[in-house]
Structures are given as C-alpha cells and as structure tokens.
Image (spheres, rainbow, N blue to C red):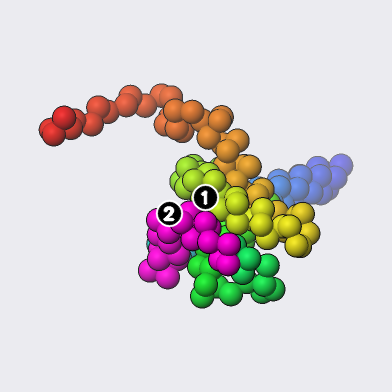
Amino acid sequence: MRLEYVNTAAALITVIIVAITAIAALVQLRHLRASNELNALLKLLELEQSPFLEERFHFVRTQLENKMKDPDFRASLDAQPVDRTIHPERHVIAWYENIGSWMKHGLIDEEAYLEIASTYINQFWQLLEPTVAIMRRTRTPWLLEDFEYLAARAKRWLAEHPRGNYPRNTEHLQASDPWQ
C-alpha cells in the first residue's frame, strides 16, 4: 500500500514538473517572439530612414504630382518592368508592398507598426494611388494589393485612434511653445 502512494506521488511530481517546464517554455517562446518582432520593427525603421529611401520619399512628396502631369511620364508606367530610374516612386510603392505582405502574414506586429507609421502610410497611399491606378490599367486589378492592404489597415487604425494611442491611465503633459 505504501508503495502505491510512493508511485502515485512520483507520478504526480513528474506531471507537475512537466507542466512547469511546459509553462516556462511557453513564456520563453513568447519573449523570443517579442524580441524577434522588436528587432524586425527596429530594422524596418532603420531602413525606412536610409538616405536611399528618404530620397525616394522626398521625390514622392515634392515632385511626383508635377511629374504625373506629363503624359510621357504616365505612359512610361506601362513598361514592364517600370524603369525605377525614371520612376523612383516605385521604390516607395515596393517598400510599402513588402511591409503590407509581411503584416498580412503576421511577420511584423500590426499594432506596433501602425502606431508608428499609419499617418505616413496614409499620406503616401494618397500620393501614390494615381500611380497604382495607372499601373493596374494594363495589369491585374489586384496589382500592389499588399500596399493597398497596408493603407486600408492604416486608415482603419487612424479611425480607431483619432486621438492617438496614449495610455488612458497616464496624464498628458502640456508642451509649452515659447514662440507662440
């Protein structure tokens, strides 16, 4: 009888140890995933601020609208592939297309990225939407759908967070403007 208690206690202790080990493994996996997501987000932000991309973002913000008035410039969007030396906006579109795909497949954290970038994504979608529309004329209607997906998610994030994403249990500080 005493041997049965010992065997039962040993089995119970084994189950408890396995359960604790499993819980510890899950916690460690969660921390590893968070670490990987943070590294991915930091790398995205670093690349986004690279001189190469910054020049293309600047082109889209300052020159694209005037360039799009030129029928030859617009017609050159029909080339396959589009010449990115003539169309530096294609680099920005490709950038957001990749991020949209990664986000759609859960490779980057949507909430964290959109909190940082939703305003810019929205701005660049508005600036680049005519380019996307022209390119879709002679290609598939779902061309660049991951950029569109990213823009739709950014628009939704902005609608759901009209005052930002500041924690409700933290008091806002008033920034003073000495030049006002």
Question: Counting other residues with Cα less than 10 Å from the Cα at mark 1, is it few (<14), some (14-19), or many (20 or more)?
Answer: some
Q: Nearer the viewer, residue 153 or 77?
A: 77
- Above or below residue 168? Residue 138 is below
- Residue 23 in the image, given as x and y percentages of width and height: 65, 48
Q: Of all residues shown, which one is farthest toward the left?
A: 178
Report whether 170 appears left or right of 100: left
Query: What's the magenta bit mostly, secondary-structure-wise?
Result: helix
Residue under label 2, please give it.
61
Which residue is pictured at 50% across the width and 68% down the height?
A: 88
Mark 1 lies on a secondary structure that is helix
Which range is magenta?
51-73
Q: Which mark is residue 127?
A: 1
- Above or below residue 44? Residue 169 is above
Residue 56 among magenta residues? yes
- Residue 54 in the image, given as x and y percentages of width and height: 40, 63
Viewer can see residue 148: yes
Mark 2 lies on a secondary structure that is helix
Q: Are discs 1 and 2 less than 8 Å apart at CB? A: yes
Residue 54 among magenta residues? yes
Q: Nearer the viewer, residue 42 or 159?
A: 159
Question: Counting other residues with Cα less than 10 Å from the Cα at mark 2, is it few (<14), some (14-19), or many (20 or more)?
Answer: some
**Residue type highlighted by circle 1:** Leu
- In primary-sequence order, the first of circles 1 and 2 is 2
**Residue type highlighted by circle 2:** Arg
Report whether 108 appears left or right of 10: left
